[in-house]
């Protein structure tokens, strides 16, 4: 069995955590900006509550992934081991079908959540459009912007040019990483195709890290191991470069947010609705979370396919029963698989905890009426959010292991 292109990196929470934090903090800033505009404040509150509910549903799906991982470890793998040891291919097929039924249910659940993110993001876009429309109406009362507003606007535009250039560099770096990952995956696929033990292991452990480790341990093709190691080193360097660029992007974004908040304060004082830029950023980070969930869906579809291949090619023809060496390889792979699936379950649990926190505590600001805040309290509230945004600059990402 040759691994496909959907091997999963169990460090996916590294992307999920900052995105969910940024969504709540950007909602908070937008909420403060719309304090004097009740109609828009209500719209924003509605969207923020919808995000809370969506995060709650996301938590439930990820906990289901945790449960299925545990079932594979505690139920499927022991049953497969028993079936193989007792030479009962029919029983093994039955167990594999049961596992595929669990996975089918997860695929359907994740797909529904992904579709809800799609609809929700469109709703946030509509709210952003509503704010822009209302803003144009309030701007009609101003004949001329003050010099201070013009200066701030000019500074923001310069930062946005710098931010665009840095984002382009980041996008290029991500393309390089993607190409290098494809190269590594192709190499791993070739090795698995030529080595029965690795092929079996790759079928029940669809995680690139453990497969690479198995190539090193096999020590049957030192030249291949050297190529894999070289690719690992290159990928780690590219990832490090990507992290630096992401930190630079986030630093520029924080500076831009701060200037926009100063501009917003001036506009609010003149009775003008500020630009809904933060809502646009909310859409960006919701899309990132949606992308992670789409990857999760593809991962489970890949696992479903691999289990089907094992069932159709191995047990139906009773190859596993007739070949003692092959049987031993499979039993050893099952033992190693438990560790990898345990790690995956732990990652899903961490992700679920992120959604749990972000669906509750992070939205406590909705309990406060922003229009009732004094200027000093409003400023303290904003300073608190700004501090949290700046802290994200440090913790937003870290290099992933292959």
Image: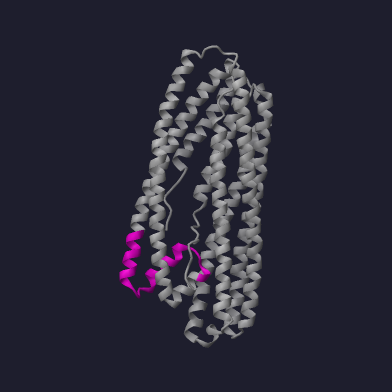
Q: Is residue 133 magenta?
A: no
Q: What residue do we see at 43% from left, 48% from top?
A: 398
The answer to which of 254 and 335 lies nearer the viewer is: 254
Position of residue 290 relative to residue 150, above or below, is below
Q: Is residue 15 left or right of residue 138?
A: left
**Span of residues in magenta:** 203-231
| Quarter of the figure with residue 362 | top right
The answer to which of 186 and 323 lies nearer the viewer is: 186
Residue 28 seen in render: yes
Q: Residue furthest bottom?
A: 322
Q: Quadrant of the C terminus?
A: bottom left
Report the magenta stretch's main SS.
helix
Where is residue 142? Give x, y as percent.
57, 13
Position of residue 27 relative to residue 86, above or below, is above
Where is residue 78? Give x, y as percent.
60, 75
Position of residue 170 relative to residue 329, above or below, is above
Q: Residue furthest top?
A: 143
Q: What residue do we see at 31% from left, 66% from top?
A: 226
Residue 58 seen in render: no
Q: Is residue 260 left or right of residue 371?
A: left
The answer to which of 284 and 88 lies nearer the viewer is: 284
Q: What residue do we see at 64% from left, 51% from top?
A: 113
């Amino acid at each position: 069995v040759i691994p496909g292109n959907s091997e999963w990196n169990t460090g996916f929470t590294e992307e999920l955590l900052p995105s969910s934090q940024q969504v709540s903090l950007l909602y908070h800033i937008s909420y403060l900006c719309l304090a004097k505009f009740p109609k828009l404040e209500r719209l924003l509150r509605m969207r923020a509550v919808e995000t809370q509910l969506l995060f709650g549903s996301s938590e439930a799906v990820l906990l289901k992934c945790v449960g299925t991982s545990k079932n594979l470890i505690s139920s499927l793998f022991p049953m497969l081991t028993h079936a193989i040891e007792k030479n009962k291919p029919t029983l093994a097929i039955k167990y594999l079908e049961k596992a595929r039924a669990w996975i089918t249910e997860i695929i359907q659940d994740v797909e529904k959540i992904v579709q809800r993110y799609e609809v929700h993001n469109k709703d946030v876009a509509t709210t952003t459009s509503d704010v822009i429309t209302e803003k144009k109406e309030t701007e009609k009362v101003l004949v001329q912007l003050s010099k201070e507003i013009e200066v701030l606007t000019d500074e923001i535009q310069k930062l946005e040019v710098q931010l665009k250039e840095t984002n382009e560099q980041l996008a290029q770096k991500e393309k390089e990483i993607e190409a290098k990952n494809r190269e590594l995956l192709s190499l791993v696929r070739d090795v698995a195709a030529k080595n029965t033990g690795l092929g079996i292991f790759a079928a029940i452990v669809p995680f690139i890290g453990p497969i690479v480790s198995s190539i090193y341990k096999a020590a049957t093709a030192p030249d291949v191991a050297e190529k894999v190691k070289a690719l690992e080193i290159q990928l780690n360097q590219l990832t490090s470069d990507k992290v630096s660029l992401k930190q630079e992007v986030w630093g520029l974004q924080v500076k831009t947010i701060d200037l926009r908040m100063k501009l917003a304060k001036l506009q609010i004082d003149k009775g003008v609705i500020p630009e809904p830029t933060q809502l646009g950023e909310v859409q960006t980070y919701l899309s990132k979370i949606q992308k992670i969930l789409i990857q999760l869906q593809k991962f489970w579809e890949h696992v479903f396919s691999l289990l089907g291949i094992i069932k159709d090619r191995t047990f139906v023809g009773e190859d596993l029963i007739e070949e003692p060496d092959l049987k031993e390889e499979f039993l050893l792979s099952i033992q190693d698989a438990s560790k990898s699936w345990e790690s995956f379950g732990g990652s899903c649990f961490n992700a679920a905890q992120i959604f749990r926190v972000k669906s509750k505590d992070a939205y406590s600001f909705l309990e406060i009426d922003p229009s009732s805040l004094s200027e000093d309290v409003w400023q303290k509230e904003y300073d608190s959010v700004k501090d949290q945004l700046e802290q994200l600059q440090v913790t937003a990402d870290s290099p992933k292991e292959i």
